[in-house]
């Protein structure tokens, strides 16, 4: 007997979105993306070629989700927005594991933002010591272009012979 599968953030998210969409139009098909589309959420209609019926189109429009003739999608990057919107529509709290995952995501994003600002400040106040890097510059297509990197702060820039003289 195999152990019980642990629910992922993706499982919680699709469950909330599915519940909200099904409350608006029970005939909608809400599926997880597979393969290279993993992380995406696919929404199909119930028509002959999975087209949306008028009721399904109105439900998607009420939810605010843009749609084509027979498919609507939610990308991994926009999933959180749609989950929070679905939770408001259903008037429910987010599950605790999902709240924790979102809080961790917010902390990581804030830490990355803080580090980027710190690096930018360091680069702005640095007394640069430039070295020429052994890279081939493709754009601009100037055969004499070089990449320069500061030894102290890591800032890189592309310099052409015209800029030097």
Image (cartoon, rainbow, N blue to C red):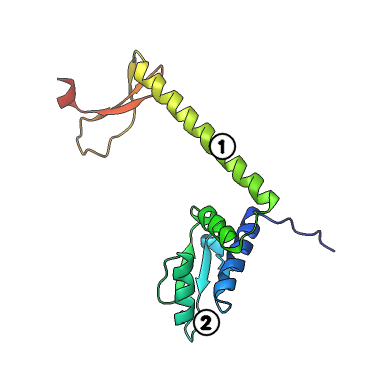
Numbered tag placed on residue 164 in the rendering:
none
- Counting from the top left corner in percent of width and height, residue 7 is at 70, 56
Q: Which residue is mark 2?
A: 46
Q: Are marks 1 and 2 in contact (CB under 8 Å)?
A: no
Residue 41 in view? yes
Q: Nearer the viewer, residue 98 or 118?
A: 98
In the orientation shown, which residue stands out farthest toward the bottom?
48
Residue at 20 percent across and 28 percent down: it is 160
- Counting from the top left corner in percent of width and height, residue 3 is at 81, 58
Q: Nearer the viewer, residue 1 or 95?
A: 95
40 vs 128, left or right, is right
- Counting from the top left corner in percent of width and height, residue 80 is at 54, 53
Residue at 52 percent across and 68 percent down: it is 42
**Disc 1, SS:** helix
Q: Is residue 117 above or below residue 24?
A: above
**Disc 2, SS:** loop
Q: Which residue is mark 1?
A: 108
- Counting from the top left corner in percent of width and height, residue 15 is at 63, 63
Q: Nearer the viewer, residue 73 or 18?
A: 18
- Neighbour class for label 1 at 10 Å: few (<14), some, many (≥20)? few
Q: Quadrant of the C terminus?
A: top left
Residue 154 in view? no
């Amino acid at each position: 007997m195999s152990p019980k599968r642990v629910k992922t953030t993706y499982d919680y998210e699709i469950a909330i979105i599915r519940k909200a969409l099904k409350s608006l139009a029970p005939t909608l098909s809400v599926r997880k993306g597979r393969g290279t589309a993993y992380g995406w959420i696919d929404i199909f209609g119930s028509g002959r070629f999975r087209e949306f019926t008028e009721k399904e189109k109105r439900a998607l429009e009420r939810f605010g989700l843009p749609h084509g003739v027979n498919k609507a999608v939610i990308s991994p990057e926009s999933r959180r927005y749609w989950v929070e919107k679905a939770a408001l529509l259903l008037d429910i709290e987010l599950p605790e594991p999902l709240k924790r995952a979102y809080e961790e995501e917010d902390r990581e994003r804030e830490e990355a933002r803080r580090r980027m600002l710190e690096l930018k400040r360091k680069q702005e106040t640095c007394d640069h010591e430039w070295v020429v890097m052994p890279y081939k510059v493709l754009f601009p297509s100037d055969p004499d272009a070089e990449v320069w990197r500061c030894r102290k702060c890591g800032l890189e820039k592309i310099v052409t012979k015209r800029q030097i003289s």
